Amino acid sequence: MRQKPFGARFRVMTEQDVTSAVRLNTLAGWNQTTADWRRFLENSPAGCFVTEVDSQVVGTATTICYENRFSWIGMVLVDPEFRNRGIGTQMLQKAIEHLDRIIPAMKLDATPLGKPIYLRLGFVPEYEIERWILNRPTVASSSEPARSCASPDETQMAKICELDRESFGADRSFLLRSLHEHSPELTSITCKDGVPIGYALGRKGMFADHLGPWFAKSHEAAQELLRSFLRQSSRESVIVDCLSSNSSIRDLLRVAGFAYSRPLTRMVRGQNLHPGRLESICAILGPEFG
């Protein structure tokens, strides 16, 4: 039987832990906010975990299930003062054990540091992702979207969720609607002959606005959606996690002033029966959500 780290107690996360969880992702330089943590708790109340040492939360791990197709692991964090004690590995194993009882297929986005750990636990690479960051002077957001883009109405929002299910591989409309409700100005859709051919959503993070998911069936649609997002966002920093295989999107980001930051690897454990369709994905929602 595995031994727990000395003095550590593992338990299910509660609403009272959100402040401590935000503290950990802030220490790590991650962009999540209280709203992001509550998205996990609202949609996976029994699948988010913390580690306590002397009543202090020093580690976290989250899971979320997408239909009965696959699950997601994210937010594996350890307080810097408590690293190298096995807490992160124990949190990850706790998440895997929980998900194995529900949906054996699970995914995550791994940093280069975490990838060897996930490989040892049975995860295999699916495809590569690149994080790009824009740093710019403070700008005033515009009330006018870019040409050909608009804020979606309810009917169009349903179309966005339908397109996203096809590209992502499972329904996550509960997340997309939450993003839209919190930051409707960062949601846009572009259509051709009345048919949606692209959409973009975003969220306001701790230190940057995050663009994603971003989907477009043409280069022109992708360009207009990016322009629209950058007009609507007023933050100095903007984050995008794009697919490494999509060179045209990398070119768009480079022209817009983004700089490459770091790689991520999407990994899967179990049968990947619902891989989605990657050809029109410009950027993922984020490593914590997929």
Image (cartoon, rainbow, N blue to C red):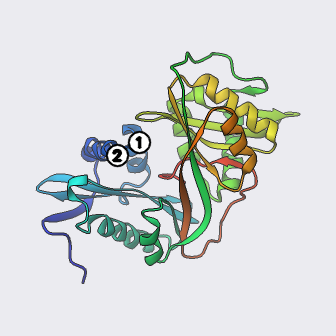
Image quarter of the C terminus: bottom right
Sort mark 1 into few (<14), some (14-19) or many (20+) by Cα contacts within 10 Å.
Answer: many
Residue type at tag 1? Gln
Residue located 48% across and 77% down the image:
122
Q: Which residue has dot 2 on it?
A: 25
Where's residue 116, x and y in %?
45, 71
Using the image, tell me which numbered label, if any, was put on residue 42: none
Q: Say what amino acid the circle numbered 2 marks.
A: Asn
Give the mark nearer the N terminus: 1 vs 2: 2
Residue 36: x %, y % from top left: 42, 42
Furthest residue in direction bottom, as rendered: 1
Compared to 2, does 80 lie above or below? above
Residue 69: image x %, image y %?
58, 66
Number of marks in the rendered image: 2
On the image, which quarter does residue 224 sit in? top right
Q: Are marks 1 and 2 in contact (CB under 8 Å)?
A: yes
Q: Position of residue 68 (x, y in %)?
A: 56, 65
Judging by the rendered image, the residue that carries numbered circle 1 is: 32
